[in-house]
Amino acid sequence: MMDKNSDNRPILLFDGVCNLCNSSVQFVIKHDKNGKIALAALQSNAGQQLLKAHQLPEKDLKSLVFIENNRAYTKSDGALRASRYLDGGWKWLYSLIIFPAFLRNWVYDIVAKNRYRWFGRQESCWMPTPALRQRFLD
């Protein structure tokens, strides 16, 4: 795994024990074939350092974090910004940014609040296969 993001790719931080989050990461991997987005679990060393650097809570964060051009985006802003880097027609999801953030984040917060109950959680963070390790920061 990489120690740092030396190529300045945008970074997606995700909850490594959340089944929904892990499925979302699998989706990103599948639809970002060229590895434009670097990945890290919120719980990882890299994730904790990035949260601290962007003055975000290091514990109990109920959002993914998307870091682009050294700026951190959370909730629906982060998810929609990440969609711009996906292959194929998934880029169109970014057009949902036209909806007011309070509406987008209301839906996001409902899912985030219930994600463990609805989708379950793992006892430990998901570990990438050796073939995918270059996509992850540590």
Image: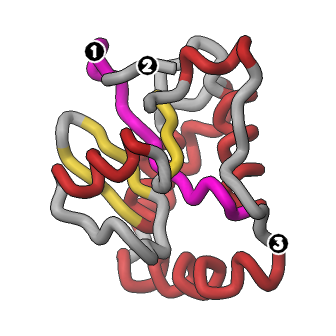
- Numbered badge on residue 6: 1
Question: First in sequence: mark 3 or mark 1?
Answer: 1
Judging by the rendered image, the residue that carries numbered circle 2 is 2
Quadrant of res 130 = top right
Question: First in sequence: mark 2 or mark 3?
Answer: 2
Q: Residue at x 71, y 50 (%)?
A: 22
Q: Residue at x 58, y 12 (%)?
A: 34
Residue 128 in picture, x, y percent from top left? 70, 30
How crowded pointer 1 is (Cα within 10 Å; few <14, some 14-19, many 20+) is rated as: few
* Image: magenta residue range: 5-18
Residue 75 in picture, x, y percent from top left? 44, 67
User: Is the magenta region chiefly helix, strand or loop?
Assistant: loop
Which structural element holds mark 1? loop
How crowded pointer 2 is (Cα within 10 Å; few <14, some 14-19, many 20+) is rated as: few
- Dot 2 and dot 1 residues touching (CB under 8 Å): yes
Q: Is residue 8 above or below residue 11?
A: above
Q: Is residue 41 above or below residue 28?
A: below
Amino acid found under the numbered disc labelled 3: Phe
